[in-house]
Amino acid sequence: MNVFDRYAKEYDRWFDENEIIYKSEIEALKRHIPKGDGLEIGIGTGRFAKPFNIKIGVDISKEMAKIAEKRGLKVIISKGENLPFNDGSFDFVLINTTLEFAEDPKKMLKEAKRVLKKGGKIIIGIIDGDSFLGKIYKEKKEKSKFYKDAKFLSANDVIEMLKELNFKNIRITQTIFKNLCDKVEVKDDYGEGGFVVISGEK
């Protein structure tokens, strides 16, 4: 049993206990989400699919999928590097704090591109490995049940991969700043925020 199966309920509860961080991530992602049919790779418990009206996702955790299904979402147990969908099936694909756990991040992005319609959008949320938050996570990862096996990518790493895969109109937003207070703050670009969202078009 993987860690996300064992601690699925604890993982889901984290979002209630860290409401300002959750709201900040939602707001940063929202600026990139288009209309249309979406897929989430690494849908987890559905905390991000639900507010963005994404009805279907893939995940490797059966226990997390059960929680997502209670939220009315359809979950297929599958790896993001090998998606069970036809070419050009979706208007957008969301990959939020999932690329860090991919065995082959570039293959996951290639698969996302394959299932996107022409002009479709990929939206990637990461803890920027080069940020203050990324450095904290890296220092603590050995003791973390969830992030022990994570490979924290930098915003630059992700941007380079998207360029190599010929994604266009790359756009970036950031949130979760050092002086995190009780209000949600989102800025364009990257370099200050711990959570970065990068999108591009097929």
Image (spheres, rainbow, N blue to C red):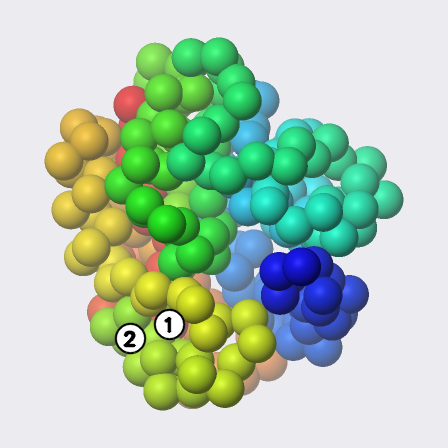
Give how far apart the Cα atoms at labels 2 and 1 are. Answer: 5 Å
Frontmost residue, 134 versus 84 = 84
Q: Is residue 185 left or right of residue 13?
A: left
Which badge, 2 or 1, is on the more N-terminal residue? Answer: 2
SS of the residue under disc 1: loop
Residue at image position (45%, 30%) is 82
Question: Which quadrant holds the C terminus?
Answer: top left
Q: Residue at x 19, y 31 (%)?
A: 165
Judge whether 181 appears above or below 109 on screen.
below
In the rendered image, residue 74, in percent from the top left (x then y), is placed at 73, 31
Taking the image as drawn, is residue 51 in sight? no
* Numbered tag placed on residue 131 in the rendering: 2
Left or right, 146 with respect to 197, comes to right
Q: Quadrant of residue 173?
A: bottom left
Specify few, some or many for label 1: CA neighbours under 10 Å numbering under 14, 14-19, or 20 or more. Answer: many
Callout 2: SS? loop
- Quadrant position of residue 140: bottom left
In the displayed structure image, the side of residue 165 where residue 105 appears, left or right: right
The amino acid beneath tag 2 is Ser
Q: Residue at x 36, y 87 (%)?
A: 139
Where residue 90 appears, as percent x and y from the top left, is 50, 20
